[in-house]
Image (cartoon, rainbow, N blue to C red):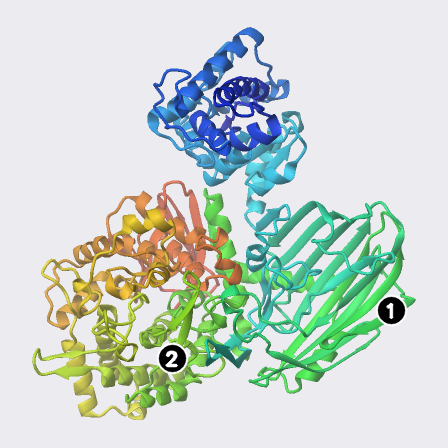
């Protein structure tokens, strides 16, 4: 990227008007308070800074006056100065402010003027953006106005109705006035709301100025660089940022400043893992004692099913087990009895960072204890991708102002419970029994066993202590044992300024592991014989760099999307890696990052697997084999309900049994109610679809013959058995199910025993499509495989009949009815609920808290009808409906009508909803801004936790994978068929995108700009692969590179 423009704030950046503003506000508010008989005192720290500074004038008036318990009409900007409205008082302040300027003048920051002069020499465009309505007046009073190409001030904002900071409107307007994009501009700000606006506008560089020396607040709120004064930065520094530093920044997720309210979200988003296990990014010295920190570690596939007593009912929940905590490292200074924690010290400096490229989490802090002793702490941690049973910590302590004994406490906590999801805390959360524990010098071992599933978990750690990189020969080391915990105490004399390093290696094995014969011996031997931290990190880092080569998406021109695309890719590789071939586990919807959804496996894989299949199809192979190994359970589940074939449960865990709760907790009402969501039989559609998609991408005939065909046809037989023929309308119907919507569990007034709805359109269309494919595939597969599947003529005849006669309700306008009877439901008063509750994504919980039900209304949690257009192209939906006997006209028009209808009736209570709506918009000729809005919602959902506290409990793997799929299929425009069609639709502010895709055994790199596509094979093999771009077909034969203008 290149820097082309710089946009300055005014107050505190160019001019020293803060004191002038304060004097004017003080006069104005003291006059108002006296008129009300109130205490007239107005101070800088208690009143000006929190209520007025940085806000548009009238909003500042309102904020302060309401803080004193008064309320006035807002008024109109034309109100006469002094009128008892917010605008009138604001106008009075303006008179006072101008009077102060006129008589006393205003001081300028010389260093800022010098920087402006340098920018002018370099032909960099310069603008000012300020919320002050006096901005132009002030600049003219000091003869600076003509030096700026644009001045966007409070007057301009009012005229154009621009939103104030922290919205980016005024900075975006300034950039546009200069003919520039935000990515080409620097924002220079001194206020928190200002740097937030720079970040929200995705500007190329957000430069913060702190006149008080407190850098943490500006860094934490969006500043990339913070200086005390502009003399500390040069134009060369800015060029360096745009040339190199911004690229490096996009590989890092960085949190500045310790924030207890945000720690659990940060811990989820800085989780380290390798597909086998994941450890949340909690500070090693903290326990899960409150709602601030949660040090969870989870091994894929390790669950435990225990009973809980709830409202005099015993229910069973199969939980994703938080295994013994190997992370714990604490230290004590001198004769202190308690270790230092973040709760009992003052945090002077703090940075928590995830380096996504190297897959390592770091934490830096400087703390001061109650005795004034200051300590610098540096921590690095990674979950070894080459040795997936291994985790590694480097914990460094540097005394800054003292010489005393330090005792490091490092061990394993087997007393840990599942505590990460508040709404589950009423349930039994004790899953571990400690069977054995012991320690020798430098090595600590703990054997725990889940108390119901009887999974043995063996954890061994090795502690090594170093002083200034030289291994420390300890004279004092002791072992501390509690009932379910064991630690080694390492005591030494510490000197001021010296660094002491603990290297902690953990080896975690369980009795479920398929890649070892003796997990106990493997744990102990591999911990004791492990190489040092740096050696292991180098091989780990190099392996990750290789994975990034295959999976990474490079986006030039969009800092935010680039960083979040990498964050999503990183967490998907933490959740599933090539190692998944070596153990039996499904893909948890919330990753290996927490206990949300109890770590269960749902239908989310239909969103998730497209990421893996384009880069590591062996991971998809492993996840589909997880389903295959549970095929007998799915057949038993179908028989239990009177069906044939295989009916997969809505939720599964370690085995193939249904794990959906029978009752569900509503955190809004505080009540427990029936949970009918197990009727979401469409999970089996997702599995069958995944089998076909895997085959489309890989052509893996061996998999289909040995595993996939059994899965696919067993599911088809289930759907053929659940469909009922009705003599009256001569059609087949599927009754008693739930669609993807999830809100509608039954018909209004029906008892729970009659749960479910009939003829869910998504279900019926997809079943018709699957059964039609089942018949087609019989003609394509080897005779030996056909004989093994052994469909009878009558069975094939029934499949064909159902595929052509399933009922799909649709009205005369072409609106597909979500399910039979949906059109008869009441409309929801959306405006009422938005006004009453604000966030109405979970309308189901809101309605139930009011003794009502979403069953009564046309309200959906997420896309339902639109899901058919997500999995099938509009033309395929049309063909399926016409095969069923429905005339639906133009397929794109059909999608548009249904999109417009259902978007008004969807609350988007699931992040998956953003993915589907964003994805299907590619078929509609909508403004790019509309598509971008939906895509941005998906990208922001986890990093900003837009669902209101859910990401802290575990990432949303579906939205992460879905958002990456949108980049490749919507924006890059790849469409995979027998050939690959490419029709790019890049956002206007993207300069270039580059990525690799593996398809049918051939891997290509795609680099796409606003007017050119470049395709390169990733290996030296000759290829005759064909690509369709526009109306032309191109063959890669004898080419090392294909370049096409579009």
Circle 1 packing at 10 Å, graded few (<14), some (14-19), many (20+), is some
Find residue 197 and report its horizontal and vertical position in percent: 48, 36
Q: Is residue 835 above or below residue 469?
A: above
Find residue 880 and report its horizontal and vertical position in percent: 18, 70
**Picture residue at 60% right of the left edge, 83% below the top:** 451
**Picture residue at 57% right of the left edge, 10% below the top:** 105
Q: Nearer the viewer, residue 326 or 576?
A: 326
Q: Is residue 831 left or right of residue 583?
A: left
Residue 287: quadrant of the picture? bottom right
* The furthest residue to the right: 475
* The furthest residue to the front: 37
Find residue 68 and report its horizontal and vertical position in percent: 51, 31
**Secondary element at image label 1:** strand
The label on residue 477 is 1
Q: Nearer the viewer, residue 898 or 861?
A: 861
Q: Is residue 230 left or right of residue 569?
A: right
Q: Which residue is mark 2?
A: 649
Circle 2 packing at 10 Å, graded few (<14), some (14-19), many (20+), is many
Q: Is residue 109 above or below residue 694?
A: above
Asked whether residue 1014 is in view, the answer is: no
Please report whichever mark, 2 or 1, sits nearer to the chain's N-terminal start.
Answer: 1
Q: CA distance from mark 2 to mark 1?
A: 52 Å
* The furthest residue to the top: 103
Confirm or deny contact between disc 2 and disc 1 (CB under 8 A): no
Q: Is residue 359 above or below residue 48?
A: below
**Picture residue at 16% right of the left edge, 86% below the top:** 797
Find residue 733 and report its horizontal and vertical position in percent: 18, 78
């Amino acid at each position: 990227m290149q820097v082309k423009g710089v946009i300055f704030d005014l107050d505190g950046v160019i001019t020293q008007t803060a004191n002038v503003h304060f004097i004017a506000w003080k006069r104005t508010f003291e006059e108002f308070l006296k008129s009300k008989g109130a205490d007239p005192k107005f101070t800088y720290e208690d009143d000006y800074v929190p209520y007025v500074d940085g806000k548009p004038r009238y909003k500042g008036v309102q904020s302060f006056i309401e803080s004193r318990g008064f309320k006035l009409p807002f008024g109109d900007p034309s109100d006469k100065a002094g009128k008892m409205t917010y605008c009138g008082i604001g106008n009075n302040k303006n008179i006072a402010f101008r009077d102060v300027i006129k008589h006393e003048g205003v001081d300028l920051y010389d260093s800022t003027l010098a920087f402006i002069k340098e920018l002018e020499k370099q032909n960099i465009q310069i603008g000012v953006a300020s919320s002050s309505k006096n901005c132009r007046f002030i600049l003219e009073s000091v003869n600076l106005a003509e030096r700026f190409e644009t001045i966007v001030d409070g007057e301009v904002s009012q005229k154009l109705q621009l939103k104030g900071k922290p919205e980016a409107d005024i900075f975006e307007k300034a950039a546009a006035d200069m003919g520039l994009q935000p990515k080409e501009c620097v924002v220079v700000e001194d206020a928190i709301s200002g740097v937030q606006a720079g970040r929200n506008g995705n500007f190329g560089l957000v430069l913060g100025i702190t006149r008080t020396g407190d850098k943490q607040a500006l860094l934490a709120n969006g500043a990339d660089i913070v200086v005390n004064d502009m003399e500390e930065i040069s134009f060369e520094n800015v060029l360096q940022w745009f040339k190199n530093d911004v690229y490096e920044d996009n590989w890092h997720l960085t949190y500045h400043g310790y924030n207890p309210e945000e720690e659990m979200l940060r811990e989820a988003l800085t989780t380290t893992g390798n597909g086998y296990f994941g450890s949340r990014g909690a500070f090693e010295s903290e326990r899960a004692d409150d709602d601030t920190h949660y040090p969870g570690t989870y091994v894929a596939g390790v669950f435990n099913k225990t009973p809980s007593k709830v409202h005099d009912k015993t229910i069973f929940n199969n939980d994703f087990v938080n295994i013994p905590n190997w992370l714990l490292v604490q230290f004590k200074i001198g004769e202190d009895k308690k270790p230092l924690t973040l709760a009992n010290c003052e945090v002077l400096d703090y940075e928590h960072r995830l380096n996504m490229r190297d897959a390592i989490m770091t934490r830096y802090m400087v703390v001061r204890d109650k005795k004034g002793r200051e300590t610098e702490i540096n921590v690095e941690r990674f979950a070894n991708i080459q040795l997936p049973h291994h985790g590694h910590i480097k914990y460094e302590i540097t005394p800054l102002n003292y010489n005393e004994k330090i005792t490091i406490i490092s061990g394993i906590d087997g007393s840990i419970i599942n505590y990460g999801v508040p709404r589950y805390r009423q349930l039994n959360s004790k899953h571990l029994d400690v069977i054995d524990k012991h320690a020798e010098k430098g090595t600590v071992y703990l054997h725990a066993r889940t108390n119901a599933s009887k999974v043995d978990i063996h954890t061994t750690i090795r502690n090594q202590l170093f002083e200034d990189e030289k291994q420390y020969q300890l004279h004092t080391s002791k072992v501390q044992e509690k009932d379910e915990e064991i630690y080694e105490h390492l005591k030494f004399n510490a000197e001021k300024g010296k660094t002491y390093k603990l290297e902690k290696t953990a080896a975690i094995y369980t009795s479920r592991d398929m890649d070892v014969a003796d997990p106990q011996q493997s744990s102990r031997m591999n911990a004791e014989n492990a190489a040092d931290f740096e050696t292991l990190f180098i091989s780990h880092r190099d392996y990750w760099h290789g994975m990034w080569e295959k999976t990474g998406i490079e986006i030039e021109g969009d800092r935010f999307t680039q960083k979040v695309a990498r964050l999503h890719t990183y967490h998907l590789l933490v959740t599933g890696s090539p190692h998944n071939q070596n153990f039996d586990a499904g893909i948890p919807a919330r990753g290996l990052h927490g206990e949300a959804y109890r770590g269960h496996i749902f239908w989310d894989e239909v969103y998730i697997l497209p990421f893996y299949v384009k880069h590591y199809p062996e991971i998809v192979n492993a996840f589909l084999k997880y389903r295959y190994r549970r095929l007998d359970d799915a057949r038993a589940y179908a028989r239990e309900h009177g069906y044939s074939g295989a009916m997969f449960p809505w939720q599964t865990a370690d085995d193939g049994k249904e794990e959906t709760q029978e009752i569900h907790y509503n955190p809004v009402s505080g009540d427990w109610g029936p949970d009918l969501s197990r009727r979401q039989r469409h999970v089996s559609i997702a599995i069958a679809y995944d089998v076909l998609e895997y085959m489309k991408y890989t052509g893996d005939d061996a998999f289909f013959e040995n595993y996939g065909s059994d899965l696919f046809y067993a599911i088809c037989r289930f759907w053929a058995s659940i469909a009922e023929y009705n003599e009256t309308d001569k059609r087949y119907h599927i009754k008693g199910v739930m669609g993807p919507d999830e809100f509608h569990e039954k018909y209004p007034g029906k008892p729970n025993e009659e749960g479910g709805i009939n003829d869910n359109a998504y279900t019926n269309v997809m079943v018709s499509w699957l059964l039609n494919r089942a018949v087609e595939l019989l003609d394509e597969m080897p005779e030996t495989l056909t004989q093994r599947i052994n469909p009878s003529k009558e069975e094939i005849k029934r499949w064909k009949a159902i595929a052509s006669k399933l009922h799909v309700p649709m009205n005369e306008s072409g609106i597909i009815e979500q399910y039979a009877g949906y059109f008869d439901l009441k409309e929801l008063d959306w405006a009422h609920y938005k006004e009453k509750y604000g966030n109405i994504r979970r309308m189901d919980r809101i309605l139930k808290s009011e003794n009502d039900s979403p069953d009564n209304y046309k309200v959906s949690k997420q896309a339902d009808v639109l899901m058919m257009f997500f999995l099938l192209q509009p033309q395929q939906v049309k063909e399926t409906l016409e095969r069923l006997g429905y005339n639906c006209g133009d397929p794109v028009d059909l999608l548009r009508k249904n999109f417009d209808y259902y978007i008004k009736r969807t609350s988007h209570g699931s992040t998956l909803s953003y993915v589907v709506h964003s994805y299907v918009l590619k078929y509609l000729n909508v403004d790019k801004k509309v598509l971008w809005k939906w895509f941005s919602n998906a990208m922001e959902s986890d990093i900003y936790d837009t669902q209101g506290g859910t990401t802290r409990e575990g990432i949303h793997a579906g939205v992460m994978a879905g958002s990456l799929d949108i980049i490749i299929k919507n924006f890059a425009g790849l469409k995979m068929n027998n050939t690959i069609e490419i029709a790019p639709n890049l956002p206007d502010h993207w300069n270039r995108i580059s990525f690799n895709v593996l398809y049918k055994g051939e891997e290509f790199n795609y680099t796409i700009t606003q007017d050119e596509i470049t395709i390169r094979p990733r290996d030296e093999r000759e290829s005759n692969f064909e690509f369709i771009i526009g109306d032309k077909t191109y063959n890669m034969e004898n080419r090392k590179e294909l370049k096409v203008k579009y």
